[in-house]
Image: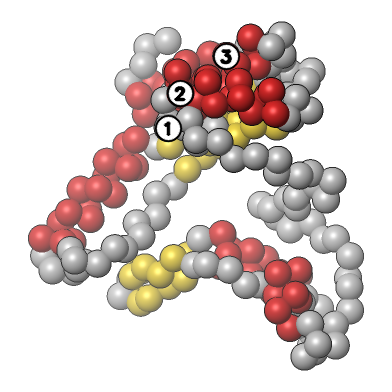
Amino acid sequence: HTGPVVLDQVAGRTQAMGRTANLAARIESAAPLNSVVISTETRRLVAGVFVTEDLGARELKGFTEEDPSAEVVARVDGECMRDASLAASEDLLLAHPEVNVIYGGNGDAALGALAALQGANRGTVDDVLLVSHDASEPELIELVNPESGLKLSVANLPRELARATIDTMIEVWEGKRPMAEDTDVPIPAEVLTPDDVQYLNQFLAEQYLSDT
């Protein structure tokens, strides 16, 4: 597989992390004995250099393929603020009334997009899939609303973020991580769905100290 990776020190060794490394490992494990299996991305790069055979679509644990009929019609900047995202989404719906999937870069972006959809008499689970990124309390309230089109939320984990921030500051203080260079610090995330309301309440209590 081919793509960007994050390099980090794990137990004193440099290790590649992230989606690219994980997908490469899954593809490798799917290869039959004495063979090499590559992804579509790598196949495009070696076309004309190696003879390859199309093995068709494969299901890999933890990964799903993009719908080949899907098309990204626009990217709009809502400034990660609800009012600005509402206005940007209204313009998006005017230009592309057929849009049926929207990904919000944070909670306010998604909720602003939902407000724009509702203003156009849309925003229900029957006509749109809305994905948010934060999993704050207002998002999860919409998540469990059976009528709402918001049905996935990529959950930031504030406690893990705080822990990683403190650890990174200590590494910089101790000279283990250079302050003058930009370095990636991987933070775990979680995808939440409306299937388990009890778990969602537990998530809010643990991550956001909510008593909802």
The picture places residue 1, in percent across and down from the top left corner, at 66, 72
Where residue 78 appears, as percent x and y from the top left, is: 48, 30
12 horizontally vs 7: left or right: left
Tell me: 105 left or right of 66: left
Measure the alpha-carbon separation of dots 1 and 2. Answer: 6 Å
- Residue at 52% across, 67% down: 4
**Which residue is located at x 70 percent, y 79 percent?**
45
184 or 85, which lies in front? Answer: 85
**Real-space CA distance between mark 3 and mark 1, rounded to the nearest whole angstrom:** 16 Å
| Label 3 to label 2: alpha-carbon separation | 11 Å
Query: Which of the pair 60/41 is nearer the observer?
Result: 41
Is residue 86 in sight in this rendering? yes
Name the mark on residue 115. Answer: 3
The quadrant of the image that shows the C terminus is top left
Q: Quadrant of residue 61?
A: bottom right
Counting from the top left corner in percent of width and height, residue 15 is at: 43, 72
Instruction: Say if mark 1 contacts mark 2, CB within 8 Å.
Output: yes
Disc assigned to residue 79: 1
